[in-house]
C-alpha cells in the first residue's frame, strides 16, 4: 500500500524531473540581421520601417514564417547621407556579431574590408564579379552572395530612352560618384558605340550636385543621366527639383527617384531585389553557406514615367515611350 509520504516523494521527483527537462531545452535563438544602406538609420528601424525597400524585405521574411522579436531582430544602420561613414558602420555591425548582413551596393566595399566571415547578402551589386565581391556568379565563394543589379546591361537602354525623349546632338550630362567610376565607364562605353556625346560630371560631395546642374546648363546639355548611388539616393527629391529648375529632362536608374519627383527611370525593380534578398537570408539562417549560393540576376526591369514632372518641364512625352512604360505616375 502506498503511503502519503511515498506519494509526495513521487510527485516531488516528477516535478523536479520536469523542471530539469525544461532547463535542459535550449532557448530558441533570436537571429540578428544587420542592415546597411544609404539614408537615415531611423527609417530602417523596427518591424515596420519607413524605408520602403527594407519594408519589402521584412514583409517577405514574414511570408517565410519569421516573426520580428521572436525569430529575429534587425540591427539597422544608414549612412545619414555621408557615404564616408560606411567603414565605421560596417565595423559596428561586425562588432555586434550579427548572423547575416543585408546591404545596398554602395555599402558593399566597406563590408568586404570589414569581415571575411559574416555572411553578406547584396541588394544589389552593379557587377559583383568585376567589383571583387565574388569569384563567379555560379560559385561566389567567400562570404558574399545575393543579387546583381545588371547596371552595365541597362545603361545603354537608359541612354536610348533618354535620346528618344530628347533627340539631337546636345550632350547628355552624366552624374556619377567618385567612389563608383564603373558607372561612368559603362555610360562612356554605351555612348561610344552609339556615337553620342557625354559630359562627365564627377560628384565628390553633396554640394557638388547643384554645381553639376549649373555646369550641365552652361554646357547646353540636352538631358541628364543620374546613377543610383550613395550620395544621390537620399537627395532624390532635391535632385528632381534641381532638374526641373534647370529645365533638364533627367533619367534615373531606380524607381524611387521617380517617386520622389524625377522624370523617368529604367532599371531593375529594387523592391523585388530586396524581397529576393529575404530568400537568401532565410537559406543562410537555415545553414546554407553564402559562397555556395549562386548570384541571382534581376528578372523584372521597369520603365517608370512621372507625368507631373513632364508637365513641369513642358515636355510632350512620345506616345511610343508611354506605351512601353510599366507605370505612369500622374
Image (cartoon, rainbow, N blue to C red):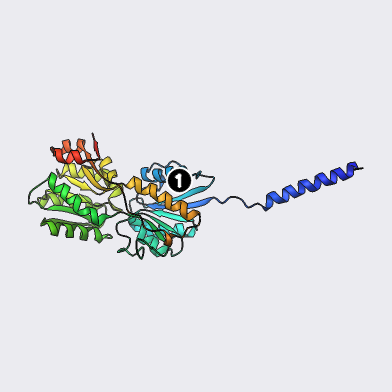
Q: Is residue 287 above or below residue 330?
A: below
The quarter holding residue 318 reads top left
Which percent across, then down, holds residue 103?
38, 54
Q: Residue furthest left?
A: 169
At 24% across and 52% down in the image, what residue appears? 227
Please state the total of marks drawn on the protein image. Answer: 1
Decide if residue 41 is on the left or right side of residue 183: right
Which percent across, then down, holds residue 75?
46, 51
Regarding mark 1 in the picture, which secondary structure is present there? helix
Q: Is residue 175 above or below residue 65?
A: below
Report the residue marked by disc 1.
Answer: 61
Which percent across, then down, holds residue 244?
18, 41
Can residue 281 be seen in the rendering of this structure? yes
Which percent across, then down, holds residue 62?
47, 43
At 36% across and 50% down in the image, what residue appears? 80
The quarter holding residue 60 reads top left
Amino acid at each position: 500500500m502506498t503511503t502519503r509520504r511515498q506519494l509526495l516523494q513521487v510527485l516531488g521527483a516528477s516535478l523536479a524531473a520536469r523542471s530539469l527537462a525544461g532547463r535542459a531545452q535550449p532557448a530558441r535563438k533570436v537571429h540578428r540581421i544587420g542592415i546597411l544602406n544609404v539614408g537615415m538609420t531611423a527609417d530602417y528601424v523596427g518591424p515596420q520601417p519607413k524605408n520602403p525597400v527594407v519594408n519589402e524585405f521584412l514583409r517577405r521574411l514574414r511570408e517565410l514564417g519569421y516573426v520580428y522579436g521572436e525569430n529575429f531582430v534587425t540591427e539597422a544602420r544608414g549612412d545619414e547621407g555621408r557615404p564616408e561613414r560606411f567603414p565605421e558602420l560596417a565595423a559596428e555591425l561586425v562588432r555586434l556579431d550579427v548572423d547575416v548582413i543585408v546591404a545596398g551596393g554602395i555599402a558593399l566595399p566597406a563590408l568586404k574590408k570589414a569581415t571575411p566571415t559574416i555572411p553578406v547578402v547584396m541588394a544589389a551589386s552593379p557587377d559583383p564579379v568585376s567589383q571583387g565581391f565574388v569569384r563567379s556568379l555560379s560559385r561566389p565563394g567567400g562570404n558574399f552572395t545575393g543579387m546583381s543589379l545588371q547596371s552595365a546591361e541597362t545603361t545603354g537602354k537608359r541612354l536610348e530612352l533618354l535620346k528618344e525623349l530628347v533627340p539631337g546632338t546636345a550632350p547628355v550630362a552624366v552624374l556619377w560618384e567618385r567612389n563608383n567610376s564603373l558607372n561612368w565607364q559603362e555610360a562612356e562605353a554605351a555612348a561610344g558605340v552609339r556615337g553620342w556625346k557625354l559630359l562627365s560630371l564627377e560628384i565628390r560631395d553633396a554640394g557638388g550636385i547643384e554645381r553639376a546642374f549649373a555646369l550641365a546648363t552652361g554646357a547646353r546639355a540636352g538631358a541628364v543621366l543620374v546613377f543610383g548611388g550613395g550620395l544621390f539616393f537620399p537627395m532624390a527629391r532635391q535632385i528632381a527639383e534641381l532638374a526641373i529648375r534647370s529645365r533638364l529632362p533627367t533619367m534615373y536608374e531606380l524607381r524611387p527617384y521617380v517617386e520622389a519627383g524625377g522624370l523617368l527611370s529604367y532599371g531593375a525593380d529594387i523592391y523585388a531585389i530586396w524581397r529576393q534578398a529575404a530568400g537568401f537570408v532565410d537559406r543562410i539562417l537555415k545553414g546554407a553557406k553564402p559562397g555556395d549560393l549562386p548570384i541571382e540576376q534581376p528578372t523584372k526591369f521597369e520603365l517608370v514615367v512621372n507625368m507631373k514632372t513632364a508637365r513641369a518641364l513642358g515636355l510632350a512625352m512620345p506616345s511610343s515611350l508611354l506605351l512601353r512604360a510599366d507605370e505612369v505616375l500622374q
